[in-house]
Image: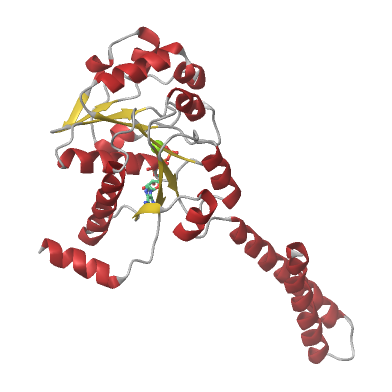
Amino acid sequence: MPRLVLLLPPLLLAALGAGAGLLADPDRAWPAAAGAVAGLVLGAAAALLWARRRRRVRDGADAAAITGLTPVAHVPPPGDHAPDRRRQEEAFRMLRAALRLHEGSAGPVVVTSAAPGEGKTTVAAGLGRALARSGRPVVLVEADLRRPGLAALLGTPTPPQGLTAALVGGVPVAELLVEVEPGLRVVPAGALPPNAPELLGSEDGARVLDELRALDALVLLDVAPLLPVADTRELLAHERHGTVVLVARPGRITRDELARAAALLPPDAPRVLVVSGQASTPRSYDRYLRDAEA
Ligand SMILES: Nc1ncnc2c1ncn2[C@@H]1O[C@H](COP(=O)(O)OP(=O)(O)OP(=O)(O)O)[C@@H](O)[C@H]1O
Ligand SMILES: [Mg+2]
């Protein structure tokens, strides 16, 4: 039935085009034919566009319905203006508060998403800062060994050795920590390996996670997306009870992608949903935030 609906716009516009052609010159057939073809093409393009949009996750409510998770924070786009920064910082505080509910759960917090570019690294960095500023020591780990971007986003220098030195060379994690600001340290990715899933899923991967757990800090892992590569699936096999933060960016991923990613999360892991991207926040919220900080 939905596929039949897609035929309606081209047929309707073709009929309209043919009608307009007939009106323009009732004595000849070609204006009607040209109108019909133009209508058909326009209608088909409109129908395709509509179908593509329908397949995408629309908004936070849509993401919640697909994953069965309530969004605990909506992270707006990064921006240079004070109101943008205020809104984003408040979203990270909301996420921080939501994670307190899972405080007792074992293991690090894993920040992931279905597809690339949904805002994982931004969320991991913002959450790390929010936690550290609340007095909680935090270790952020650049565990995306495909497209690491955490150390760059935090503005820290990247030493030659990082997580891969711990995984491959047995370098103790404690020797790889780089201070970002008081209470916030990062383990950079280091040299990128050709076999990230094997490394993360290996006994060495389990050993490094144990070392991270033993640090006197809350550990946040910024990892690769779930669908294109096996890295995070391997890592989650070691981390079945750590909390997962699933970042979803409406408009960027399809409903099917988000459903598949949610189904890959370990069944016993506490998980929270974070929505990233544009949102229509009520103006009164902005006023409230500004007044509260004045
Ligand atoms: N909440 C947001 N809303 C809109 N754009 C965002 C948001 N967070 C990040 N972005 C933008 O999206 C792009 C990707 O962000 P980020 O690196 O955090 O995503 P990622 O999921 O870590 O990507 P990758 O899969 O490549 O590691 C950046 O250009 C960033 O500025
Ligand atoms: Mg990233």
Q: Nearest the camera: 277 or 257? A: 257
Q: Is residue 55 left or right of residue 277?
A: right
Residue at (14% x, 64% y) in the render:
292
Vertical side of 201 occupied by 86: above or below: below
Q: Is residue 65 left or right of residue 151?
A: right
Vertical side of 200 occupied by 287: above or below: below
Percent from the top left, x then y, of residue 144?
A: 41, 29
Q: As drawn, which residue projects farthest toward the left? A: 294
Q: Nearest the camera: 285 or 118? A: 285
Percent from the top left, x then y, of residue 56?
A: 57, 55
Percent from the top left, x then y, of residue 278?
A: 40, 59
Picture quarter containing residue 192? top left
Residue at (78% x, 66% y) in the render:
4
Q: As drawn, which residue projects farthest toward the top? A: 169
Q: How is the image coloured?
A: secondary structure
Quadrant observed for ligand 2 in the rendered image: top left
Q: Nearest the camera: 188 or 182? A: 182
Q: Answer whether residue 25 is visible to the viewer in this image.
A: yes
Give the mark count: 0
Residue at (28% x, 51% y) in the render:
94
Q: Which quadrant, please, contains the C terminus? A: bottom left
Q: Which quadrant, please, contains the N terminus? A: bottom right
Vertical side of 13 occupied by 254: above or below: above
Q: Answer whether residue 194 is visible to the viewer in this image.
A: no
Percent from the top left, x then y, of residue 48?
A: 68, 62
Picture quarter containing residue 218? top left
